[in-house]
Image (cartoon, rainbow, N blue to C red):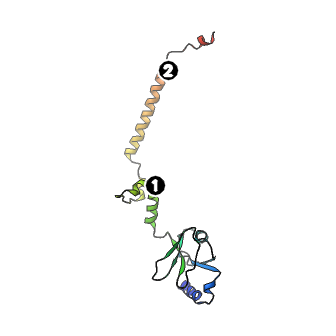
Amino acid sequence: MEVASKREEERRNSPESSQSPYLEVFCKTSGKFRRFAVGTIAGFAVHVINRNLDFGDASALHVEAVKEGEEPVTFGPNAILVNYGSGWKLQTVTDEGNDEAVRMQQMSKLFPEAMKSPDFQLKDMNQVNSGINFQYIGKISLVFAFMFLLGGILTFLLENLPAANISATFSE
């Protein structure tokens, strides 16, 4: 991290830093700076950064501009990357440590009605997906029994219908 902060300090103090033809985004996962042309869309920058990461590394979710003592400015996927001046640094935000947020997002996609209720409590994904129990198996078995019963009744009725005299209609 010290190398990155020294590099950032040198870049900020250089005379051409205000008119640089590129922007540097610091990747938290790899610890490297990636350079992008002025006017690059943030979604493309995230794609390029994630493509260059090693397998198993935490991927970037989005880019944000940060400054000590200021609230970060988050760039959406269609936003154009901008340098806000001295003290501001562009960096990636990773999904590392956001397991709870990812689980909440998955739950909101699976059960949107439940997320709207005021008494919603987040359960583990294991509890949500463990819907196969004895009651579930019993209901499935009951449905199969009714299907076979209905099939048997229809077969019995069709076999015992009186034979139709089809030849009488064709003899005329």
Q: Which residue occupies 47% across, 83% down?
A: 68
Q: Which residue is mark 2?
A: 159
Q: Of residues 76 and 93, which is closer to you in this image?
A: 76
In the image, 129 versus 42, the foreground residue is 42
State which tag comes first along the sequence, 1 or 2: 1
Task: State the image quarter where residue 137 is shown.
Answer: top left
Q: Is residue 10 above or below residue 72?
A: below
Q: As shown in the figure, which amino acid type bears the numbered disc 2?
A: Glu
Count of all numbered marks drawn on residues in the image? 2
Q: Are marks 1 and 2 in contact (CB under 8 Å)?
A: no
Q: Image check: 119 left or right of 49?
A: left
In the rendered image, which quarter contains the C terminus?
top right
Residue 32 percent coordinates (x, y): 58, 78
Q: Please say if 113 is above or below 87.
A: above
Check the image and name the residue furthest to the left. 119
Q: Which mark is residue 110?
A: 1
Decide: few, some or many residues near mark 1? Use Cα within 10 Å; few <14, some 14-19, many ≥20. few
Q: Amino acid at mark 1?
A: Leu
Q: Position of residue 49 (x, y in %)?
A: 59, 72
- Relative placement, left or right, of 53 versus 112 is right
* Residue 3 visible somewhere in the drawing: yes
**Res. 37 image quadrant:** bottom right
